[in-house]
Image (spheres, helix red, strand yellow):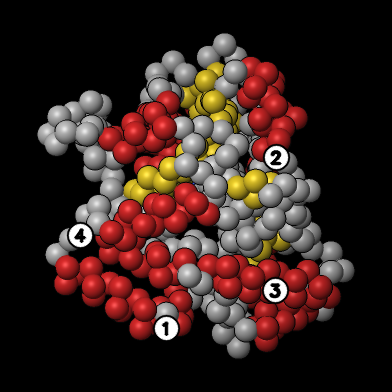
């Protein structure tokens, strides 16, 4: 039985008539930028996260970069973050001229180890950029406590955390703002690249709005900042608005599939995902830990079951970021997790049978092939 890791076409098939109507309406309207869908999607996402402002953009990467620009992070500043993430979290810190400072991750949920943050703070530290991984939030309560104590800015990398909450409070409300990604494979994915900033700060919102369009303020062709071409186009906003109608259902389906995995893989010796206290989990990924990761992945692949490794190589092993750590062994938990993590297929268009079949194969691997 084939088990695909992603099935983006199935999302389209489910919503075909609405998607066709919405995208054709945009194309035939001739209004491709900053139109009605764009504005409505900004309001919908901001309201959903109980934030005052949503600023729709071309990517999650630009969301982080623009937020950092807007709050004035730049040369001479240090930003505390993690090396176990997609490169954009760190790359954007470098792009604004600041220095990423890597703190190791926590072994159970793979996000920043809050116990290690204070030791990394220096007089140059300006911000903490927690990366909310795989569908739940980092320890935002403790991050807020530390940020308050040392007067640091918090920028949430919420690329994978749309709809994530801690004690019922939505991401976007734990710092100056958060950056979402709507990249194709996210729980809420566009038909291409797209992203958004949410923030409660009026001034930062206005600055971000200007920076996303060449720094142009309220008056056309008058520039207040150096900016970028970072708008979300109207077709993407239309697609995202259609998919948004299904997001709750799709996330519930992910939770059902996670429950099957949890039940069926219970005593296999493989370490199962951990949901931190106070968090909801939107199951962007279902991540297990095993020291026979590569063997397990090859075995599953041989049986037509897809899996992915997020992330196989920590950022401090890559040439542009090597100087930011003391080399191999300097972030031991990050390095161990990168060696052992495997993400099993979890997406709303999988059947129970496909997930049970995957579990049976994992069981076979851990018992028969042990
Ligand atoms: C943790 C993290 N940060 C940032 C990004 C960047 O988002 P985008 O791909 O939309 O630029 C991603 C997306 O893949 C991500 O997973």
Q: Is residue 37 visible?
A: yes
Q: Earlier in the sequence, mark 4 or mark 2?
A: 4
Q: SS class of the residue under badge 2?
A: loop
State the residue at coordinates (60%, 37%).
174
Which badge, 3 or 4, comes first in the chain's sequence?
4
> Residue 90 placed where, x, y %?
48, 36
**Residue at figure coordinates x 31%, y 38% from the top left:** 209
Q: Is residue 85 visible?
A: no
- At mark 3, the secondary structure is helix
> Which mark, residue 13?
1
Q: Quick check: marks 1 and 4 in contact, CB under 8 Å?
A: no
Of callouts 1 and 3, the N-terminal one: 1
Element type where label 4 sits in the image: loop
**Distance between mark 4 and mark 2 Cα atoms:** 39 Å
N-term-proximal mark, 2 vs 3:
2
Q: Position of residue 343 (x, y in %)?
A: 63, 63
Label 2 belongs to which residue? 139
Q: Quadrant of the N terminus?
A: bottom right
Rendered position, 270 above or below 322: below
For discs 3 and 4, the disc positioned in front in the rendered view: 4
Q: CA distance from mark 3 to mark 4?
A: 38 Å
Q: Is residue 277 left or right of residue 47?
A: right
* Above-or-below relation of 215 to 165: above
Q: Which mark is residue 256?
A: 3
Considering only order in the chain, which callout, 2 or 1, is on the residue closer to the N terminus? Answer: 1
Quadrant of the image for the C terminus? bottom right
Whole-number angstrom distance, CA of label 1 to CA of label 2: 37 Å
List the residue tagged with mark 4.
32
Pick whichever of labels 1 and 4 is earlier in the sequence.
Answer: 1
């Amino acid at each position: 039985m084939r088990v695909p890791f992603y099935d983006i076409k199935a999302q389209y098939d489910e919503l075909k008539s609405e998607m066709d109507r919405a995208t054709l309406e945009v194309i035939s309207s001739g209004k491709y930028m900053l139109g009605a869908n764009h504005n409505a999607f900004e309001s919908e996402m901001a309201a959903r996260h109980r934030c005052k402002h949503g600023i729709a953009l071309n990517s999650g990467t630009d969301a982080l970069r623009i937020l950092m620009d807007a709050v004035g992070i730049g040369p001479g500043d240090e930003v505390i973050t993690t090396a176990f993430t997609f490169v954009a979290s760190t790359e954007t810190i470098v792009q604004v001229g600041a220095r990423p400072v890597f703190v190791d991750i926590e072994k159970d949920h793979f996000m920043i180890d809050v116990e290690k943050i204070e030791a990394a703070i220096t007089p140059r530290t300006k911000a903490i950029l927690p990366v909310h991984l795989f569908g739940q939030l980092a320890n935002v309560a403790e991050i807020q406590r530390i940020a308050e104590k040392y007067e640091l800015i918090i920028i949430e990398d919420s690329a994978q955390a749309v709809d994530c909450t801690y004690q019922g409070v939505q991401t976007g409300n734990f710092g100056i703002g958060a950056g979402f990604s709507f990249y194709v494979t996210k729980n809420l994915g566009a038909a291409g690249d797209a992203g958004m900033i949410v923030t409660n700060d009026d001034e930062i919102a206005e600055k971000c709005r200007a920076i996303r369009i060449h720094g142009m303020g309220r008056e056309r062709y008058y520039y207040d900042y150096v900016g970028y071409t970072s708008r979300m186009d109207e077709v993407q906003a239309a697609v995202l608005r259609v998919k948004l109608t299904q997001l709750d259902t799709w996330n519930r389906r992910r939770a059902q599939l996670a429950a099957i995995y949890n039940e069926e893989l219970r005593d296999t010796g493989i370490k199962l995902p951990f949901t931190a206290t106070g968090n909801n989990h939107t199951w962007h990924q279902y991540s297990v830990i095993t020291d026979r990761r590569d063997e397990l992945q090859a075995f599953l692949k041989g049986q037509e079951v897809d899996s992915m490794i997020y992330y196989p190589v920590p950022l401090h092993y890559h040439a542009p970021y090597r100087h930011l750590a003391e080399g191999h062994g300097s972030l031991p938990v990050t390095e161990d997790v990168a060696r052992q993590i495997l993400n099993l297929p979890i997406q709303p268009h999988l059947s129970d049978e496909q997930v049970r079949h995957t579990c049976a194969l994992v069981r076979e691997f851990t018992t028969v092939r042990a």
